[in-house]
Image (cartoon, helix red, strand yellow):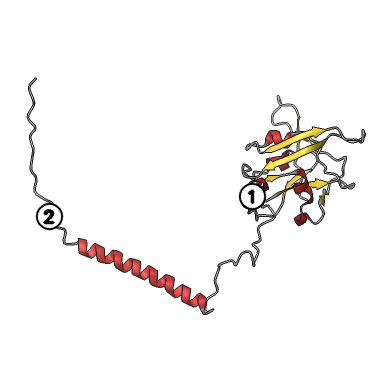
């Protein structure tokens, strides 16, 4: 088998760019001017000449809008029991599959089912609010709490007792809706002559 010859072409080295030193000097002066501006702002804020925008958390708690969706909580009925009827709509609608419910028959036959076990794996939760929207009895909401820290792994699984009775809730929160009130059904106007009236569920509104 014949070995083919490889032709090697020697090229001249690239010419020296006289502007490389100018470009390097430009980088140095730009970085220096930025550092000088940072130092000037630091000194002004240190001696209280200029107001800082830094929030001293947790000494200065942050505030969010009313639409903020933070830590979950379960609402209570007038008798102190959770409003949840263990219908599994929140768990079914959860895109992160982080809600686990075990249903049981309530000792009072006049009442619906109730959750023997209600847990949320908060590390999997994406805080989308789908559980809040799906609940027909206003039993679960996302509140304004945003501070969620801890080193214990069990802390990140919120139990029914924690969701309903933790100290931040000051003894629990009752719903603004009546206990027998469900999502009302409204009639949506027909979109065309061939389309009949469509029944749909509306959300629970502002509370």
Q: Which residue is mark 2?
A: 15
Q: Position of residue 134 (x, y in %)?
A: 73, 38
Q: Position of residue 72 (x, y in %)?
A: 71, 48
Q: Position of residue 35 (x, y in %)?
A: 39, 69
Q: Position of residue 194 (x, y in %)?
A: 70, 24
Query: How would you rate the neighbour count of disc 2 (Cα within 10 Å): few for under 14, some for 14-19, many for 20 or more?
Result: few
Residue 65 is labelled as: none
Helix, strand or loop under label 1: loop
Image side of residue 138 versus residue 35, left or right: right
Q: Earlier in the sequence, mark 1 or mark 2?
A: 2
Numbered circles on residues, count? 2
- At 69% from the left edge and 42% from the top edge, which residue is drawn? 120
Name above or below for residue 152 compared with residue 118.
below
Q: Of circles 1 and 2, which is in front?
A: 1
Q: Nearer the viewer, residue 5 or 35?
A: 5
Image side of residue 161 versus residue 152, left or right: right
Q: Nearer the viewer, residue 171 or 183?
A: 171
Query: How would you rate the neighbour count of disc 1 (Cα within 10 Å): few for under 14, some for 14-19, many for 20 or more?
Result: few
- At 68% from the left edge and 35% from the top edge, which residue is drawn? 93
Circles 1, 2 touching at the beta carbon (< 8 Å): no
- At 92% from the left edge and 33% from the top edge, which residue is drawn? 109
Q: CA distance from mark 1 to mark 2?
A: 63 Å
Q: Nearer the viewer, residue 133 or 167?
A: 167
User: In what quadrant of the picture does the N terminus appear?
Assistant: top left
Helix, strand or loop under label 2: loop
Q: Quadrant of residue 125?
A: top right
Q: Quadrant of residue 6?
A: top left
- At 22% from the left edge and 65% from the top edge, which residue is drawn? 22
Q: Which residue is mark 1?
A: 152
Name above or below for residue 167 compared with residue 92.
below
In this view, the residue farthest toward the top is 1
């Amino acid at each position: 088998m014949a070995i083919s010859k490889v032709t090697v072409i020697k090229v001249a080295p690239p010419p020296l760019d006289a502007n490389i030193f100018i470009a390097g000097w430009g980088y140095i002066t730009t970085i220096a001017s930025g550092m000088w501006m940072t130092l000037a702002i630091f000194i002004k804020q240190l001696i209280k000449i200029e107001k800082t925008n830094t929030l001293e958390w947790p000494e200065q708690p942050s505030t969010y809008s009313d639409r903020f969706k933070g830590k979950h909580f379960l609402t209570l009925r007038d008798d102190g029991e959770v409003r949840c009827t263990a219908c599994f709509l929140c768990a079914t609608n959860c895109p992160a599959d982080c809600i686990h419910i075990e249903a049981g028959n309530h000792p009072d036959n006049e009442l619906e089912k109730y959750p023997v076990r209600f847990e949320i794996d908060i590390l999997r939760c994406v805080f989308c609010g789908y559980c809040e929207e799906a609940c027909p009895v206003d039993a679960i909401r996302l509140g304004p709490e945003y501070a969620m820290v801890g080193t214990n792994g069990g802390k990140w699984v919120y139990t029914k007792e924690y969701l309903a009775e933790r100290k931040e809730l000051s003894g629990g929160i009752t719903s603004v809706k009546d206990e027998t009130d469900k999502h009302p059904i409204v009639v949506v106007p027909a979109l065309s002559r061939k389309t009949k009236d469509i029944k749909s569920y509306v959300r629970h509104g502002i509370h």
